[in-house]
Image (tube, rainbow, N blue to C red):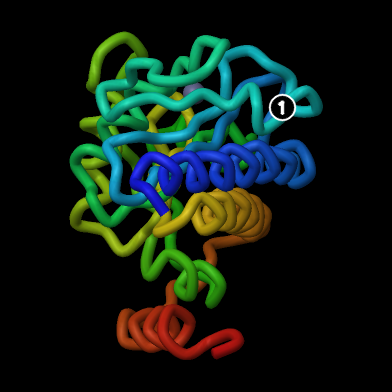
Amino acid sequence: MSAIAEVAETLTRLRSEVAQLHAHLPAYGLVVWTAGNVSARVPGHELIVIKPSGVAYDELTPANMVVCDLDGRVVDGEHAPSSDTEAQAYVYREMPHVGGVVHTHSPYAVAWAARGESIPCVTTMCADEFGGPIPVGPFAIIGDDSIGRGIVETLRDSRSPAVLMQNHGVFTIGPTAKAAVKAAVMCEDVARTVHLARQLGEPIPIEQTYIDRLFDRYQNVYGQR
Ligand SMILES: [Zn+2]
């Protein structure tokens, strides 16, 4: 297959995958209106596939996904890309292992972000998926690369695939777009559970050695092999 045919085939697959993954965002209560998005890296190319800006989730199709370069410029697509494209492109530029990025304003997680408080690791599920607390990133507003920088600076030294950007929302990363969506779903669930636990007392921390064991088992052993 020629190189051009190969990238065309990959783009067709990723347009469809990214369009479909968006259905999880409203299904799990992570978004309202159009405020959340999924993107995927085009492996081997300096390109990403991302949601068009302001298009409703039930109107997303493979054809209206937008292909951008890693500076956030549109390469292929009839719509303007998500307003978060610049932040996400920055993450793909700086973190070569990242294959997918998700952004939501899911309510329980944003309640923690609004207080600038990281979510403590007090459930085994949090240890499994996040390997420790879910960290808070800096306050940053849209318009330059400060959101992207904040995400990368916070996640670079963390095992967590999720960051709560202060006063804003959740950004998750993963080796694939699907993994990043899963992290966004899990982040909201952990945020909700720990919020509920807090209502009647102080949750019990999990010892670091157990967090390490849980994280290692879940990341390396759990599931179908
Ligand atoms: Zn946002």
Q: Nearer the viewer, residue 173 or 78?
A: 78
Picture quadrant where residue 78 is located: top right
Q: Is residue 204 left or right of residue 94?
A: right
Q: Residue at x 45, y 53 (%)?
A: 119
Q: Residue at x 60, y 87 (%)?
A: 224
Q: Nearer the viewer, residue 56 or 188?
A: 56
Some atom of ligand 1 lies within 8 Å of the CB belonging to the residue at label 1: no
- Name the image quarter holding the C terminus: bottom right
Q: Is residue 195 above or below residue 222?
A: above
Q: Is residue 212 above or below residue 182?
A: below
Counting every numbered tag in the picture gives 1
Q: Is residue 215 above or below residue 4?
A: below
Q: Residue at x 50, y 35 (%)?
A: 103
Q: Which residue is mark 1?
A: 60
Q: Residue at x 74, y 27 (%)?
A: 57
As drawn, the residue found furthest toward the front would be 1
Tell me the SS state at disc 1.
loop
| Residue 64, position as x, y percentages in the image | 64, 22
Q: Amino acid at mark 1?
A: Leu
Q: Nearer the viewer, residue 206 or 65?
A: 65
| Residue 202, position as x, y percentages in the image | 53, 62
Q: Is residue 104 left or right of residue 119?
A: right
Badge 1 crowding class, 10 Å Cα cut-off, few under 14, some 14 to 19, many 20 or more, is: some
Q: Nearer the viewer, residue 12 or 153?
A: 12
Can I make out residue 78 in this image?
yes
- Name the image quarter holding the N terminus: bottom left
Can I make out residue 102 in this image?
no
| Residue 39, position as x, y percentages in the image | 49, 37
